[in-house]
Image (tube, rainbow, N blue to C red):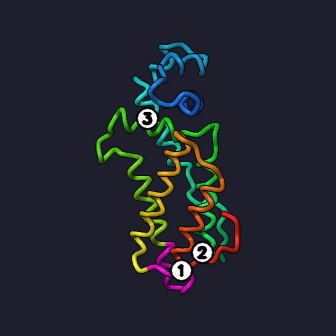
């Protein structure tokens, strides 16, 4: 694929992301993407055969660009500081009303039921659990955190975050509710409540 084709494909993926963020997954048609990109139907089909294929590309791009900790960790950050920073970044994502793929992602998984070996959502979840588990283990080794089962703690954190994401798209969540959950998580790991989450 030449440079022009690569740029065109990237443009289509970026525009499609905007459409999916606005409409979700199940209501998006190829015509919506054509309209957003201001290209012909044939021009779109040169790159993608379906909204499913296009959404998977959007998710892959998100995964490549995602930085679990917002790129804000310094060399001297403690495990507790890293954990707090992670939760703060997650809070921003949960509360973001516009430009979020949360609804589209859940619709995609309910509708498409991807094969386990191609399940980006599961890979992201498992990867985040491993990162959190390692942070907690380091925190325990350095006597900053208290935890007998770091893997279980990491899974519980991720399950709490997924629950909050679902609530944000259904019944709604407030910053205060998220803060209370994060304070609880941190307190179970022995982190004092001396900052706002």
Residue 70, compared with residue 45, is above or below; it is below
- Identify residue for label 1: 145
Residue at 58% from the left image edge and 40% from the top image edge:
100
Residues 55 and 8: in front is 55
Residue 9 appears in the rendering: no
Residue interval drawn in magenta: 135-147
Q: How far separated are the C-alphas under marks 3 and 2?
A: 34 Å
C-beta proximity under 8 Å, tags 1 and 2: yes
- Identify residue for label 2: 80
Residue at 41% from the left image edge and 47% from the top image edge:
121
3 or 1: tag closer to the N-terminus = 3
- Identify residue for label 3: 107
Q: Residues within 10 Å of mark 2 (few under 14, many from 20)?
A: many
Residue at 63% from the left image edge and 50% from the top image edge:
174
Position in image of residue 17 (x %, y %): 56, 33
Identify the element where label 2 is drawn. Answer: helix
Q: Residues within 10 Å of mark 3 (few under 14, many from 20)?
A: some
Position in image of residue 6 (x %, y %): 54, 32
Q: How far separated are the C-alphas under marks 1 and 2?
A: 7 Å
174 vs 12, left or right, is right
| 3 in the magenta segment | no
């Amino acid at each position: 694929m030449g440079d022009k084709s690569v740029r065109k494909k990237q443009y289509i993926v970026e525009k499609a992301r905007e459409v999916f963020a606005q409409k979700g997954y199940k209501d998006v048609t190829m015509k919506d993407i054509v309209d957003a990109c201001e290209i012909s139907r044939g021009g779109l089909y040169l790159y993608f055969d379906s909204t499913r294929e296009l959404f998977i590309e959007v998710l892959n791009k998100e995964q490549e660009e995602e930085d679990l900790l917002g790129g804000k960790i310094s060399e001297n950050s403690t495990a507790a500081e890293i954990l707090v920073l992670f939760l703060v970044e997650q809070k921003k994502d949960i509360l973001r009303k516009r430009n979020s793929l949360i609804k589209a992602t859940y619709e995609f998984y309910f509708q498409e039921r991807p094969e386990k070996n191609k399940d980006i959502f599961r890979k992201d979840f498992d990867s985040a659990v491993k990162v959190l588990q390692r942070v907690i283990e380091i925190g325990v080794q350095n006597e900053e955190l208290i935890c007998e089962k770091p893997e279980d703690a990491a899974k519980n954190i991720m399950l709490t975050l997924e629950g909050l994401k679902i609530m944000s798209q259904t019944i709604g969540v407030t910053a205060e509710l998220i803060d209370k959950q994060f304070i609880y998580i941190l307190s179970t790991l022995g982190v004092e409540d001396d900052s706002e989450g």
